[in-house]
Image (cartoon, coloured by chain):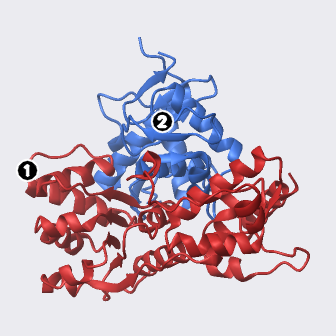
Amino acid sequence: MKKRASEVEYAETRDYLWQTILKQKTFTIGSLQSDGVKLERSSIQQYLRALCRAGYINFQEQGEWKENIYTLLKPVSEPPRVRPDGSQVTQGRGRQNMWRTMRIRKVFTLNDIVALASNEEHAVAEEEAETYIRYLEKAGYIKNTDGKSRPKATFRLIRDTGPKAPMIQRVRQVYDQNLREVVWPK
Amino acid sequence: MNQIEIIQSKKKGGNVNGGNSAIDVASTQNGNQPEYQSATIAPLKNVAIATKALGRAMTRPRHLPGMICFYGPSGFGKSYSAAFAANVHNAYHIECKSTWTKKAILVAIAKEMGLIPARTMYELTEQISERLALTDKPLIIDEMDHIVKREAVEIIRDLYEASGCAMLLIGEENLPNALQKWERFHGRILDFIAAQPADYSDVKVLANFYCKRVKIAEDLQRELARIAKGSIRRICVNLTRIEDEAIEAGMDEIDLHTWVDVLKKQFWTGEAAIRKEYVR
């Protein structure tokens, strides 16, 4: 049995909806629902409303008893993460940057990660990087290659599962968004 | 300890500044502090060059070409800079291998985008260009030389033509020359930029990240810049080494005299056995 947290299911809903929106370009809530996926109208509506406020899509009212027709305005590849008021969620950007840095560098130290993943828009603190590295090591993504203690150690990426950063969830488990499974604890 | 606090507070300052360009932040001198400490490595010469060039290609008017060629000898920190630029611009990044066939290149790009690779090269090209055109994300291709050797340059041109996305092509010193052979490709390049050798100013920036706990005197930093011969990798290795040795000797400040005459240490110049962590 694979463990699942509600956070994960939400991420997958967003993924599914956005992929469908990209395909259809002009759509209604009904056209987003499909037989295979059980989605509440209200939860779709919630996401669409947030997307409207953020300017990714817009809609035209068709009058009473008729469904609104939505159109895609900003086709970005990643499903936008927006709050109900339309502002961007930036949580997870630091980890995404750290993961990308590891995949690009392959061999790296803690200092490398902090230096390369921090920029003007998003700073990565040393403690943040250390925590992430600790979990990834436990989950078997990276390996300590010279046996030094963590701040000085050199790591090698040994398991590159894909572009999406492994998530550390509140329940202290590592979830891989590429494989769509919990990889640690097993 | 004090130094760490300064860096931390600077980090917060950097956040408030928001989207200022790397150079603006670097040139803002704070009167209260004797020496400026950057919260990011953005002021490094090659990092600034690569990040800005890619940004320029992304925001170019559509009638201009959108590819940037970034070239220079190995060790100048091209890939290092590319990693930073990829994070700033949220880019797709692939590093080519010598064994890659034309199809392998396309499959790698598709995987990097999180797509399930299609079967044929034709479908793959369609699939990738569609995704590139949909998003504003740029594509960074490292070790471009392998693509040139495989005569697979046209594949990249196809992707560019179909999507118009900004691309950063990274390769060795003779890359611009090698590309000249494909005239149609050559014309799509907005800029040829040469990687610059690292110098004293780069050592100063890197010291904030690779040698946080020990203060390095200016003469030692200058010497380090001299022996590094332009290589970012050598600077990072030596800064880490200096920090280790100084902490072991119980110092929180170190200068050239102490390093050479008291501790009797030498710099790592890459001439001895190469440490495996810095081999790519």
Q: Is residue B35 visible?
A: yes
Query: What is the x, y in percent for residue A83?
Result: 62, 49
| Tag 2 and tag 1, C-beta contact below 8 Å | no
Picture layout, residue A183 above or below residue A33: above
**B118 lies left or right of B133:** left
Q: Which residue is mark 2?
A: A145
C-alpha separation, residue under disc 2 versus residue under disc 1:
38 Å
Q: Amino acid at mark 2?
A: Thr
For the residue pair A59 and B8, the one nearer the viewer reads as B8
Label 2: element kind:
loop
Q: Which residue is mark 1?
A: B120
Asked whether, in this view, residue B180 is left or right of residue B226, the answer is left
Q: Please state the horizontal and vertical placement of residue B25, each as a whole percent of the image.
A: 70, 77
Expressed as whole percent of the image width and height from the top left, the position of residue B113 reads: 32, 51
Chain coloured red in this rendering: B
The colour applied to the residues of chain A in this rendering is blue
Q: Residue at x 67, y 42 (%)?
A: A128
Nearer the observer, B269 or A10: B269
Category of crowding for the residue at label 2, using alpha-carbon neighbours closer than 10 angstroms: few (below 14), some (14–19), many (at least 20): some
Q: Nearer the viewer, mark 2 or mark 1?
A: 2
Quarter of the image where one finds residue B174: bottom left
Residue B28: give its label.
Answer: none
Task: Label 1: state its secondary structure.
Answer: loop
